[in-house]
Image: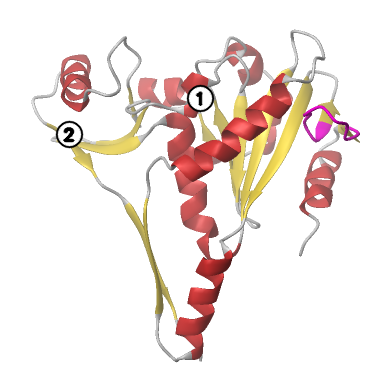
Amino acid sequence: MLDYESTVRSWFSNHGYQITKIPETNEESPDFLITDDISTYLLELKTKFPSEDEIDERKKILSSGEIHNVDELITSRKVLSKIIWKAKNQLKNYEKGGDILRLVWLLSTDHLAEPRLDQFEATLYGSTYLQTTERYGNCYFFYNSDFFRYREVLDAAIVSTESKGKLLINPLSPRYLQMKNSSLLKYFRETSIVDPIKLDKERQAFLVDGDVDRADEQAILQYLKEKYNSDKIAIDTTYYLSGTIDF
């Protein structure tokens, strides 16, 4: 098994940050304290592996010469929300000043890494894809979301596989502008930074930013029709599909 903590330490060190491992105690605490000339960050690393049952099933199918298919709905998932909740508690319990930025790094591995990355994003943002007569795109805060639930704690998240990552900014955080002005953004490609407010302004995404019941899908769709002056808006169910065969 790879040492993912060392990978995270190397990433920040290579970009000029000072990174310190926070000693473990009986109290819940995050993994790292990270600083540069601009900002101070707390970071908790969480890794999501496939379950033993998922790994065993894949091995059994591949060893039989059959195609192993992955068919994953890209939506919020309770099992991922529990991981985020745990990270939130660890970040919340460590006091280090009011201007500190709190991040969670959610790293997905192995054959389910790609869909898990997208599912983590959907869980944090409560997002889904929408189709109108004019455009297609992600809609942020359509459903209940962990960035809303934990807006006082979570300022941003890094979601990644072992080969790629994205920086997700929480626009509901009271430190949103502080996060936007931090140095961390310059180490991600523009296409790998998700800022729903910016994407909404650029008409690259939809954003539910009003006081509307997230449990009432029809009320949300009506809100979006009025906001975007569109007669027809449809939810587009999105899946991750792949197939693997062992030659």
Residue 59 percent across, percent down from the top left = 53, 80
Q: Quadrant of the N terminus?
A: bottom right
Image height of 118 relative to 124, above or below: below
- State which region is magenta: 22-32
Residue drawn at 32 percent across, 11 percent down: 210
Tell me the mark number nearer the camera, choosing from 2 and 1. Answer: 1
Residue 101 percent across, percent down from the top left = 71, 20
Q: Residues within 10 Å of mark 1 (few under 14, many from 20)?
A: many
The label number, if any, that marks residue 14 in the structure image: none
Magenta run includes residue 164 = no
Residue drawn at 72 percent across, 28 percent down: 90
Amino acid tagged 2: Glu
Amino acid tagged 1: Phe
Residue 80 percent across, percent down from the top left = 52, 43
Residue 61 percent across, percent down from the top left = 45, 83
- Relative to 128, 81 lies left or right: right
Labels 2 and 1 touching (C-beta < 8 A):
no
Image height of 144 relative to 47, above or below: above
Identify the element where label 2 is drawn.
Answer: loop
Image height of 25 relative to 96, above or below: below
- Residue 185 shows in this picture: no
Q: Foreground residue, 181 or 138?
A: 138
Q: Foreground residue, 168 or 46?
A: 46
Mark 2 vs 1, N-terminal side: 2
Quickly name the residue at label 1: 147
Identify the element where label 1 is drawn.
Answer: helix
Quarter assignment of residue 14: top right
Quickly name the residue at label 2: 134
Magenta run includes residue 27 = yes
Q: CA distance from mark 2 to mark 1?
A: 28 Å
